[in-house]
């Protein structure tokens, strides 16, 4: 990749930060990450009758393995917040920029549609993911040296994988809805409606189907991986592969639409 | 050199046909594109930039297909859109720097380019302020600056002076003329303010209902369409009496010191007019097309 191309890509990243990841969006993601992880830990700990006198006490009272389990579970438990974060980001960056004419402005410069889509997805998907990861690691480090020694990194990666797959699913739906509606508020509300709707519908589904619907499918993963409940490997495979395929398919369709079909003009 | 070549371009938005078979060749120089609101000017510009795809027809810009090779074409084109919405939380300098990097320039090149453009466009006073605080005139200047930052060969200006006061409008047009003269940058100016084009354009295309109704140099179009003239003299009654009897004059009116004449043969009328003026020792103040030449052309073509 030549220098000129790199300059273009970095300037697009800078644009995303200055336009769509500025105050208070980034701060909101950070607060949601801290809230998800801390409240997740507190809720689970209270169920387990751990004597909590403060976050510090809690953190020092739990074992590394349990912590990772709790981390994985709280990523699933805070599915609603992840929906809110990604719906907001996709609505602002895709639908908002289309509605305000900023995409038209960007496409009037010598930038490839492919690069714009790629950089937007990269920034919007990975920034919250990195923030969640950073906050998780921060709490891990707070637990001290002993925890690091006992920690199963394999399980930690599983917990991250759960966050990744969950985020990808929510993100892909948010992007597709944003490109379809091209209106910030309509996209945000529609994405919330679709994702919360799917989540609520899953409660009335028979348990044989329910385990394939997010976030229930991820919950069985957490329980299985941390040896609380045993599930067959086939079931585990199918419980997440549908989510992965759907996410990648939606992102691919969104990409094709943006690069091959989308017309950047006011009348559209 | 041909910059844009369009043949039978058709573009529909649902049931609305925005372009209905436009054929147009744009060469180096300053070209004007005029037409009423909704005539298809902006749609045509969007097609040149590769922002939208024509439903039918053929278009090439610098020999490339704008939909397929849009990014390569836009390396050589600068554009100022109608009512540009630049991000309000950027300062003018930040925005120009980021646009410079969109053209692939490194950090130091961008700074050099931005400083040069700021000087040319005269942005020093407000370039470090947030764009949200700019007046309409400042936004237009910034718009021209961002269009020029990539050293384009061709610049498209869509209604460039719509928000400017008369003084800024004249300065803006003078700047365009200077950039063409000194830097060799070609322009396509889309506007419905006809007096602007008369000042700077070499060729004009009139677009209406999605087709090019007329095209040519200002001189040719004036010869073809301008029939009404305004003659201002010190002694209008004497001139009015003489001209009234001339068979070449189709219509004549006079008001105060001005005489309005309509004639289809300007060359012949000129000879008669100057003969009368010299024979009768009439002091002439001005002889001009009534309403402006382009306005008459436009009225006759668009109807």
Image (cartoon, coloured by chain):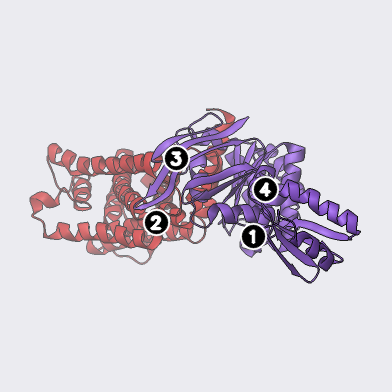
- Foreground disc of the pair 3, 4: 4
Q: Which residue is mark 1?
A: B130
Query: Under tag 3, what secondary structure?
Result: strand
Q: Which mark is residue A91?
A: 2
Residue B121 makes an appearance in the image: no
Q: Image quarter for residue B282?
A: bottom right
Mark positioned earlier in the residue sequence (3 or 4)? 3
Tell me whether marks 2 and 1 sit on the same chain.
no
Q: How far apart are labels 3 and 1 at the CA level?
A: 40 Å
The residue tagged 4 is: B222
Alpha carbon separation for disc pair 3 and 2: 34 Å
Q: Which residue is mark 3?
A: B9
Residue B111 shows in the view: yes
Subunit that carries the residue with mark 3:
B
Residues at marks 3 and 1, common chain?
yes
Direction from residue B119 to residue A95 in the image, left or right: left
């Amino acid at each position: 990749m030549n220098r000129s191309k790199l300059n273009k890509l970095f300037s697009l990243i800078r644009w995303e930060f200055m336009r769509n990841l500025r105050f208070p969006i980034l701060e909101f993601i950070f607060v949601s990450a801290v809230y998800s992880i801390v409240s997740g830990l507190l809720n689970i700990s209270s169920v387990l009758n751990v004597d909590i006198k403060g976050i510090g006490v809690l953190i020092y009272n739990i074992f590394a393995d349990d912590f990772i389990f709790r981390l994985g579970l709280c990523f699933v438990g805070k599915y609603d917040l992840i929906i809110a974060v990604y719906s907001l980001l996709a609505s602002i960056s895709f639908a908002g920029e289309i509605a305000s004419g900023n995409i038209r402005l960007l496409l009037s410069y010598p930038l490839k549609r492919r690069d714009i889509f790629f950089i937007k997805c990269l920034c919007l998907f990975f920034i919250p993911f990195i923030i969640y990861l950073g906050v998780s690691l921060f709490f891990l480090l707070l637990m001290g040296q002993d925890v690091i020694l006992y920690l199963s990194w394999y399980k930690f990666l599983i917990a991250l994988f759960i966050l990744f797959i969950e985020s990808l699913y929510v993100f892909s739906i948010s992007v597709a809805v944003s490109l379809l509606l091209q209106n910030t508020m309509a996209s945000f509300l529609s994405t919330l409606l679709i994702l919360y709707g799917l989540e609520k519908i899953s409660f009335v589904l028979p348990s044989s189907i329910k385990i394939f619907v997010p976030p229930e499918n991820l919950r069985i993963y957490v329980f299985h991986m941390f040896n609380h409940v045993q599930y067959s490997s086939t079931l585990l495979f199918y419980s997440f592969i549908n989510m992965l395929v759907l996410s990648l398919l939606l992102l691919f369709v969104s990409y094709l639409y943006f690069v091959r079909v989308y017309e950047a003009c006011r009348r559209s | 050199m041909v910059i844009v070549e369009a043949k039978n371009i058709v573009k529909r938005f649902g049931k609305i046909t925005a372009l209905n078979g436009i054929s147009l060749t744009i060469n180096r120089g300053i070209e004007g594109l005029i037409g009423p609101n909704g005539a298809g000017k902006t749609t045509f510009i969007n097609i040149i930039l590769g922002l939208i795809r024509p439903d039918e027809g053929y278009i090439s810009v610098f020999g490339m297909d704008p939909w397929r090779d849009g990014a390569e074409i836009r390396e050589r084109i600068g554009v100022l859109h109608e009512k540009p919405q630049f991000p309000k939380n950027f300062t003018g300098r930040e925005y120009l720097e980021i646009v410079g990097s969109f053209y692939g320039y490194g950090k130091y090149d961008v700074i050099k380019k931005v400083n040069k453009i700021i000087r040319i466009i005269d942005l020093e006073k407000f370039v470090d302020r947030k764009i949200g605080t700019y007046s309409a005139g400042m936004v237009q200047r910034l718009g021209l600056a961002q269009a020029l930052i990539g050293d384009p060969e061709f610049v498209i200006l869509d209604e460039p002076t719509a928000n400017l006061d008369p003084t800024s409008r004249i300065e803006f047009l003078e700047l365009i003329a200077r950039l063409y003269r000194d830097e060799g940058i070609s322009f396509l100016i889309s506007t419905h303010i006809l007096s602007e084009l008369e000042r700077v354009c070499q060729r004009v295309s009139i677009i209406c209902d999605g087709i090019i109704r007329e095209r040519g140099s200002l001189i040719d179009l004036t010869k073809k369409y301008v029939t009404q003239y305004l003659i201002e003299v010190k002694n209008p009654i004497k001139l009015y009496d003489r001209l009234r009897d001339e068979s070449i004059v189709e219509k004549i009116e006079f008001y105060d010191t001005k005489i309005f004449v309509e004639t289809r043969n300007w060359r012949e009328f000129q000879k008669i007019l100057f003969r009368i003026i010299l024979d009768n020792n009439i002091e002439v103040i001005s002889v001009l097309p009534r309403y402006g030449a382009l306005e008459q052309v436009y009225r006759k073509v668009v109807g």
